Amino acid sequence: MKKKYQGSARAKRQQLQALCSKFETPRMKLSESVTDYFSQTMAIVNKMCIHGDKTDDVVVVEKILRSMTPNFNFVVCSIEEAHVVQELSIDEL
């Protein structure tokens, strides 16, 4: 079935919508490490890019910063103070 609908624009659009909702809804859990959350988010972004989405680095960086647990508020504040978030790349984050 995957091979049959792989080329269908409608199926690709549905897959992309599902990935976009996966990207927007999750938040970092208290027991989760930063690297685990970061890698999980980047895996979703990579899948979105495969399906044709043009997500900018700024959107991903902002998503990661606003989804951090309250334990990391001081880190987020220091990153925002030290860098311009709109110019910050994923690698720099």
Image (cartoon, grey):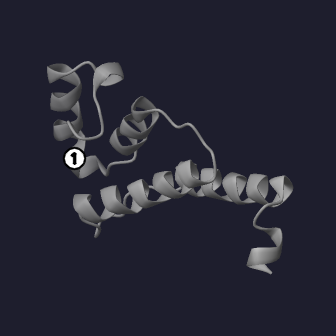
Image coords of residue 48 (percent x, y)? 57, 52
Image coords of residue 41 (percent x, y)? 42, 56
Image coords of residue 18 (percent x, y)? 68, 58
Q: In the rendered view, does 63 fall on the left or right side of 90?
A: right
Q: Amino acid at mark 1?
A: Phe
On screen, residue 87 above or below 35: above
Q: Quadrant of residue 53?
A: top right
Q: In the rendered view, does 91 fall on the left or right side of 39?
A: left
Q: In the rendered view, does 5 fall on the left or right side of 16?
A: right
> Circle 1 sits on which residue?
72
- Observer-nearest residue: 72 or 10? 10
Residue extending farthest bottom: 1
Task: Judge the density around disc 1: few (<14), some (14-19), many (≥20) Cα neighbours within 10 Å.
Answer: few
**Quarter of the figure that contains the C terminus:** top left
Image coords of residue 12 (percent x, y)? 75, 57
**Quarter of the figure that contains the N terminus:** bottom right
Identify which residue is drawn at 20% across, 21% down: 83
Q: How many numbered discs, if any?
A: 1
SS label for mark 1: helix
On screen, residue 56 above or below 87: below
Identify which residue is drawn at 26% across, 18% down: 84
On screen, residue 19 above or below 64: below
On screen, residue 64 above or below 38: above
Q: Quadrant of residue 75?
A: top left
Identify which residue is drawn at 22% across, 51% down: 71
- Observer-nearest residue: 64 or 77? 64
